[in-house]
Image (cartoon, rainbow, N blue to C red):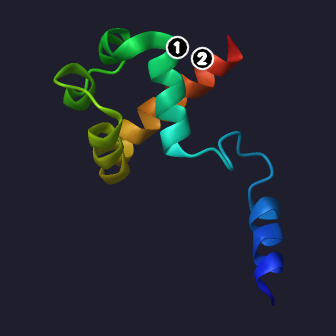
Amino acid sequence: MNRGDIGQQDVNTQPRNPLHGITLEHILNALVAHYGWDELGRRIAIRCFTHDPSIASSLKFLRRTPWAREKVEDLYLAQRRD
């Protein structure tokens, strides 16, 4: 299997995942642009959003904390539906 086949296989393994191909950084940037840090911290009460927030520190936390990442992804999907 060559490198091109792997990419095609990845596309086919999650055809119904609405987040497939969207990075966590993109999701976070979109939420911050839409809500701002204050509102994001109210909607998802995690310290990285409420105390000296930054994209870098939030990404680090979200990548290590599955429950928080799930909340962020769920909010992103809800925001896109609206």
Q: In which quarter of the image is the C terminus?
A: top right
Q: Where is residue 51 in the image (x, y as percent from the top left)?
A: 16, 23
Q: Is residue 35 left or right of residue 54?
A: right
Displayed quadrant of residue 81? top right
Displayed quadrant of residue 37? top left
The foreground one among 54 and 39 is 54
Q: Nearer the viewer, mark 1 or mark 2?
A: 1
Q: Where is residue 5 in the image (x, y as percent from the top left)?
A: 83, 78
Q: Where is residue 27 in the image (x, y as percent from the top left)?
A: 53, 34
Q: Is residue 20 above or below residue 11?
A: above
Residue that protrudes farthest toward the bottom in the picture: 1
- Specify which label sits upstream in the sequence, 1 or 2: 1
Displayed quadrant of residue 2? bottom right
Residue marked by disc 2: 79
Q: In this view, does 22 lie above or below 29?
A: below
Q: Is residue 24 above or below residue 3?
A: above
Element marked by disc 2: helix
Q: Where is residue 54 in the image (x, y as percent from the top left)?
A: 29, 31
Q: Residue, x 31% and y 53% (percent of image)?
A: 64
The foreground one among 74 and 34 is 34
Q: Residue, x 49% and y 22% (percent of image)?
A: 31
Residue 50: image tag: none
Disc 1 to disc 2, how far (Cα)?
A: 9 Å
Q: Is residue 69 left or right of residue 10?
A: left
Q: In this view, does 66 lie to the left or right of 27?
A: left
Q: In which quarter of the image is the N terminus?
A: bottom right
Query: What's the residue type where badge 2 is placed?
Result: Gln
Residue marked by disc 1: 34
